[in-house]
Amino acid sequence: MKKSCAVLFTLLIAAATTYSQSFTLDSFNKAKAALDRSVTAYGGRDALSSISNVSIKVNGESVHRNQSRRPGDFDRTQYNGEVVLDLKNSRGMQVQKGQYPGGFHWHSGFVADAGNRTFLITR
């Protein structure tokens, strides 16, 4: 009886391992196909590799959970940000502006140029 239980247990583990690996493989294949379509839509691998500058701008809201003026209420304030990367020359810049409930406005950022870095914060 113990021997048959051990064999059954071993078979169940082997089947479960094989079954879970097929889920992982299916997920990988679907993700790879989606990524390949995306790379093709943006001009192919060579076009993406030749990108030398990237710029991202963000405009939205910050949600102040556990920092709001009243318990259970989530205050929202304006948030703006920008990131610029110069990959060719190893430079980057990030600036963000926002505020907290109660009127505290902040503005911060940094600039990095190869080995030099500068941080700024204003109010």
Image (cartoon, rainbow, N blue to C red):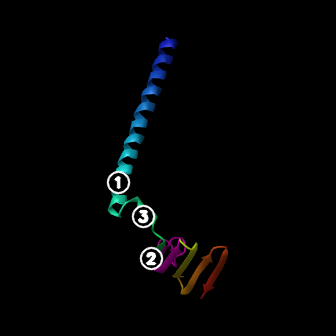
Mark identifier at residue 58: 2
Relative image position of residue 81 (x, y in whole percent): 49, 78
Relative image position of residue 35 (x, y in whole percent): 38, 55
Q: Examine the rendered structure and indicate whether residue 55 appears above or below residue 106.
A: above
How much space separates mark 2 and mark 1, taking CA atoms?
25 Å
Residue 37 occupies quadrant: bottom left
Relative image position of residue 107 (x, y in whole percent): 56, 84
Q: Examine the rendered structure and indicate whether residue 39 appears above or below residue 94.
A: above
- Mark 3, mark 1: which one is toward the viewer? 3
* Circle 3 residue: 48
Total number of numbered discs in the rendering: 3
| Badge 2: residue crowd in 10 Å (few <14, some 14–19, many ≥20) | few
| Majority secondary structure in the magenta region | strand
- Mark 2, mark 1: which one is toward the viewer? 1
Q: Residue at x 61, y 76 (%)?
A: 112
Is 84 positioned to the left or the right of 25 in the image?
right
* Circle 1 residue: 34
Question: Mark 2 is on which residue type?
Answer: Val
| Tag 3 near tag 2, CB within 8 Å | no
Is 50 positioned to the left or the right of 107 in the image?
left
- Mark 3, mark 2: which one is toward the viewer? 3
